[in-house]
Amino acid sequence: MLDQNVKQKLIAIVGEDNFFDSEENLVVYSYDATPNYQAMPDAVLKPKNTSEVQDIVKVCNEYKVPIVPRGSGTNLCAGTCPLEGGIVLLFTHMNKMIEIDEENLTVTVQPGMITLDLINAVEEKGLFYPPDPSSMKISTIGGNINENSGGLRGLKYGVTRDYVMGLEIVLPNGEVIRTGGKLAKDVAGYDFTRLMVGSEGTLGIITEATLKLIPTPETKKTMLVLFDSLEGAGAAVQAIISNKIIPATLEFLDQGTLEVVEDFAKIGLPTDVGAVLLIEQDGPSEIVERDMEKMKEVCEHSNALSIQVAKTEEEGLALTTARRAALSALARKKPTTILEDATVPRSKIAEMVHAINEIAKKFDVEICTFGHAGDGNLHPTCMTDARNEEEIHRVEEAFAEIFAKAIELGGTITGEHGVGVMKSPYLAWKLGEEGVEAMKTLKFAFDPNNIMNPGKMFAKETKKRVVVQK
Amino acid sequence: MLDQNVKQKLIAIVGEDNFFDSEENLVVYSYDATPNYQAMPDAVLKPKNTSEVQDIVKVCNEYKVPIVPRGSGTNLCAGTCPLEGGIVLLFTHMNKMIEIDEENLTVTVQPGMITLDLINAVEEKGLFYPPDPSSMKISTIGGNINENSGGLRGLKYGVTRDYVMGLEIVLPNGEVIRTGGKLAKDVAGYDFTRLMVGSEGTLGIITEATLKLIPTPETKKTMLVLFDSLEGAGAAVQAIISNKIIPATLEFLDQGTLEVVEDFAKIGLPTDVGAVLLIEQDGPSEIVERDMEKMKEVCEHSNALSIQVAKTEEEGLALTTARRAALSALARKKPTTILEDATVPRSKIAEMVHAINEIAKKFDVEICTFGHAGDGNLHPTCMTDARNEEEIHRVEEAFAEIFAKAIELGGTITGEHGVGVMKSPYLAWKLGEEGVEAMKTLKFAFDPNNIMNPGKMFAKETKKRVVVQK
């Protein structure tokens, strides 16, 4: 619980209306989209501007009160679960579009802006903000930046990091700095802009962001390709890239996912094939046509069972919407859904999916896999029940083996979800103890009192997924 | 001078053949491509592998000996001038191409590899490494990464940072870490990969890099557009981007530069116009044709005096080669050439060039300006004589005003050259004292003994350009 003195100081900053500490309010912010993690904050605050954020941070730094900055809580690494209590900071009032600059192709926003609102606003000007995390309907830009969110268009267009040009940041000591700007090139000092992207709220609080835009692609085409085996789909992914085509989207769904998605979306997807690729290309229409033809050929050579090109934009949209619904669809099957994002070099996808299936069999757990095949970013998803302790233990062991396999194949423990609490026990598998130590050095140099989202990124002694259950 | 004990330890690591401390050897590495900076190192070492680098760093950290990692010394910020003595580390033996991975579109190299050799090697496989600093014929990849080098293709393709996927780094404590990998998506921990890019050798030593490749654009077209005024050229740059065209190259040369370049290259460039744009587009031929047509129209509307599309690839190459020769051409005019890279948002280019001309007049110094108009990355270049102290003082004052103007217009003190010693007095103008302090915090957390390229990035008391003249 907050000290009364601290509470009064915080209320003096944001006002009674923007300070919440009733039981029902605290429960709402005690968890995020990650199953099995819950911890109560001591208060929830809604600052109205950077200056209030700055004052809050100064108070918290003085009294060593943890701060958890939170967007819409859609992250899947328990990154916004207030593990050590303290305050949750919401950006509900700081959700404005500040400017679209059509001359410099930038947009400047406050962190609370909803991703899809931003995408729609710039599209009205013929501009394009490519990062499209599956949660974009409700996720915020601040959350996307903190997690370096990916999405379906990562292969061709990159991830959130590739679009952040400048930031306003409140540091753990309460000072405000501005990094970057509307500048395609800027090498004045260390790249704090990208250092902040994906730092999961552990280094400071983002209060404004300038993002890069590009012209909207003229047209887009979508196709669905069925394969009887994983190998076929994997070979097709390889062959597309070897043929020097970089599609906008190159998504993979295994048989299990397909079945569940069709049951949910009911758009006539086949459910009896080994694997499916959902492929999109965008750009000038002549190039899109040419690439689609070439990719059809490539898929035929990789023994595709059938190739279906969406006849209309609506039909294409229905296919990608179905793909985006994969998590929701899988979540209907069992009380608990654990979605992971082990990632491997693109060339290792088929091998990785096979390994996942073997591991699921070994531990007798139910795992479906879908994901961004072009990126090697897979989402093995386990349908389970958190109340069944014995099964959850097997699920944990299975995922640990999956992470180990990803590392063995030159991959990583997390492609786009972040480390948070969930992956922290495995971070050293990717970075080595020396790498983790170097990152801790950086963290504690910036935040000696460890007030910024403590307990994230770096593991404590435990390796258990379920760390707090109040 | 090195302590005899330290010298013996270093020789034991690299061997007599790779340790140099004769006067003539030291002089060679006492300066780089930046005029007016010189300081003698105590020794020059050529390690053969990561393990030797690691051992060298451990010795230097123990005995607090400065280390300056150096590629080909083409940087323009005095970034590799061994200001505080110590050892210069050369990567002459660590210059191998380790692997081109056509499946994952990556190349893995040692830091000493020459940039153009890498570009040529991957082009043989139909692949493309876009970063093309003007010094690419002799610069090394390690140097490019340390400086986050830009180039002519930055507008469309980004800079070195955008192509670095993974690094092997020897930290100042002698530990080796590996970051990233052949992964389009990886959010395991802080983004140390990008933190190292552009860190100017102040945080560690890069011993291996995995870089991203893309398919080679199918075709390329070049055109030269003449304007009677800066405004015309500036308006055309604006209009091209507003028309949603992102050309591969969009270079600007003012009248002064043009004259000197023609005198040097003798390819029939006009020398009596106000400004020139050199424009290239690459990609599928139908799109290149379409974009070139549209850009011609746009330039006509911006009152272009004439538009000349290169008829052959050779003719196009001659034009870009002439542009790349701008610095060399200008360097012939006077004993000392100081090339700066103040950068502004693209929309402010005409305003900035006008300001540069006014400032040059005010201080009675000779400045020509050329640069990457699409990026807002300008190169005001002063032809002067370092032996004329009074003039050099005026040059310093002029550049200080130029930097101040760039900042006023939302720009930065350096777009692609780095801070080094040369810009360190101005760093706080861009970042604020708080920003510089935060960066110092990071530096000293990593390198408490300040052995890694000391004296760079962060200014001492002085503001003078000429800091050491032995």
Image: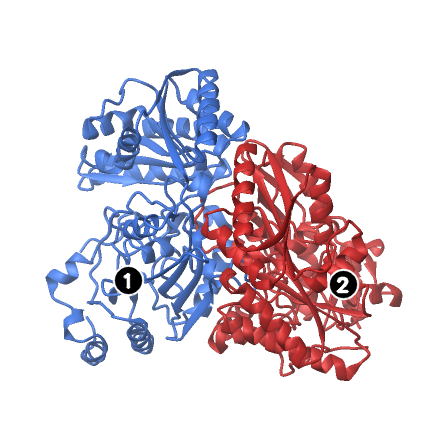
Chain colours: A red, B blue
Is B355 located above or below residue A404 in the figure? above
Which chain is mark 1 on? Answer: B
Q: Is residue A29 at least partly visible in the picture?
A: yes
Which of the image's four quarters has the N terminus of chain B?
bottom left
Residue at (40% x, 56% y) in the render: B458
Q: What percent of the width, then of the height, locates residue A444?
A: 55, 71
Q: Is residue B295 left or right of residue B145?
A: right
Q: What percent of the width, then of the height, locates residue A352?
A: 56, 68
Which quadrant of the view contains residue A251? Answer: bottom right
What secondary structure is marked by label 2?
helix
Residues under numbered marks 1 and 2 in contact, where contact means CB atoms less than 8 Å apart: no
Work out how far the residue at label 1 is from the one at label 2, CA to CA, in angstroms: 48 Å
The amino acid type of the residue labelled 2 equals Leu
Q: Nearer the viewer, mark 1 or mark 2?
A: 2
Q: Is residue B215 left or right of residue B315?
A: right
What secondary structure is marked by label 1?
loop
* Residue in front for this viewpoint, B64 or A369: A369
Q: What percent of the width, then of the height, locates residue A400?
A: 62, 77
Q: Which residue is mark 1?
A: B96
